[in-house]
């Protein structure tokens, strides 16, 4: 005698998708819109290519130096790329610990510490990074003896550090608040002080949650170095376009294309490395599965707002 349970008709006919399957008319309409979009995209691409060809920007003589002349790389591209990487690396090396300190300070139980950190974060996060670079350059010129040759590097790094440390502070705060309250409760049950809980429990576990946002900010840092080349004369990657174009037959489009490809390659390498690192960290330890993104950072509490151990707003300290 059979004892197995028979499947009901409702179970057999349960939907396997979360949306209505398009019918014949909807499929035809979607196909028509797809073809129209592809046709419009092809028309725009043809218009751009035809315009470049009419101005001789696609001629081989404009692109040949990047394939046949090593001097263009040795004189312009590689030194500019080195300056870009150095400025971005210095900015992140300084901004990351500073942002971590500010983010942890914003979670302090002391109102004065929390308020001071919040003021610094909100102030520098509200100022455009280019203005910070210009102010830093003027300050170094007025009050220091830094050589004019290296002053743009100092100004670029200073502006990037002040702005990105403020952004990273919110990333750190969001990563810590994304952890369940049980982590803090368990640490307290073991007799840990708040500093020990933050150092040995909360920060290590929040790293994987913060990593995507940290990598996104690193990509922003690499791209923002171009602001120093545009306004301060910093010899970064984008600034190398003008001398290259002047010395190799006004090949502006070719220079911009090569620089863009280098930026894309550099940022793709960063994101790929970060993705593999995140996967290894998630496999190597248990995490909450939370991920901190830009929306999470923007949805955090106001500077004067304190959160309890569950991450909910607590306005007891608000005047």
Image (spheres, grey):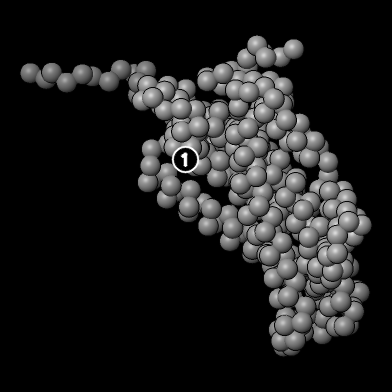
Q: How many marks?
A: 1
Quadrant (top left/top right/bottom left/bottom right) for the C terminus: top right
Q: Is residue 275 left or right of residue 173?
A: left
Q: Locate residue 192, reporting x and y percent.
A: 42, 28
Residue drawn at 84 percent across, 78 percent down: 244
Q: Locate residue 27, reporting x and y percent.
A: 62, 38
In the displayed structure, 271 sits above or below 127; it is below
Describe the element under mark 1 as helix, strand or loop: helix
Q: Is residue 126 left or right of residue 203?
A: right
Quadrant (top left/top right/bottom left/bottom right) for the N terminus: top left
Residue drawn at 60 percent across, 22 percent down: 109
Residue reaching furthest to the left: 1
Which residue is the site of mark 1? 204
Residue drawn at 75 percent across, 45 percent down: 163
Q: Locate residue 43, reporting x and y percent.
A: 81, 58
Residue drawn at 60 percent across, 34 percent down: 104
Observer able to see residue 154: yes
Residue nearest the observer in this picture, 235 or 282: 235
């Amino acid at each position: 005698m059979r004892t197995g349970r028979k499947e009901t008709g409702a179970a057999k006919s349960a939907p396997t998708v979360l949306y209505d399957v398009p019918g014949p008319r909807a499929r035809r309409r979607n196909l028509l819109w797809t073809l129209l979009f592809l046709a419009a995209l092809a028309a725009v691409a043809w218009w751009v290519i035809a315009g470049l060809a009419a101005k001789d920007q696609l001629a081989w003589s404009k692109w040949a130096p990047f394939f046949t002349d090593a001097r263009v790389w040795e004189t312009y591209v590689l030194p500019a790329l080195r300056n870009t990487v150095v400025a971005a690396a210095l900015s992140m090396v300084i901004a990351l610990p500073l942002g971590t300190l500010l983010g942890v300070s914003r979670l302090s139980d002391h109102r004065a510490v929390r308020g001071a950190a919040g003021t610094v974060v909100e102030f520098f996060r509200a100022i455009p990074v280019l203005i910070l670079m210009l102010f830093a350059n003027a300050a170094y010129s007025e009050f220091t003896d830094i050589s004019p040759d290296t002053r743009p590097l100092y100004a670029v790094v200073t502006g990037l550090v002040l702005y990105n440390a403020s952004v990273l502070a919110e990333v750190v705060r969001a990563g810590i608040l994304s952890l369940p309250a049980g982590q803090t409760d368990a640490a307290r049950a073991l007799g840990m002080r708040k500093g020990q809980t933050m150092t040995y429990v909360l920060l290590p576990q929040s790293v994987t949650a913060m990593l995507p946002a940290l990598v996104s900010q690193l990509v922003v840092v690499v791209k923002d170095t171009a602001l120093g080349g545009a306004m301060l004369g910093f010899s970064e990657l984008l600034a190398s376009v003008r001398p290259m174009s002047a010395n190799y037959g006004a090949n502006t489009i070719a220079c911009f294309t090569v620089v863009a490809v280098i930026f894309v390659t550099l940022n793709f390498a960063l994101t790929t490395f970060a993705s593999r690192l995140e996967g290894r960290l998630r496999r190597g330890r248990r995490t909450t599965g939370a991920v901190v993104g830009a929306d999470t950072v923007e949805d955090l509490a106001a500077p004067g707002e304190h959160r309890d151990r569950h991450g909910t707003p607590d306005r007891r300290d608000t005047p």
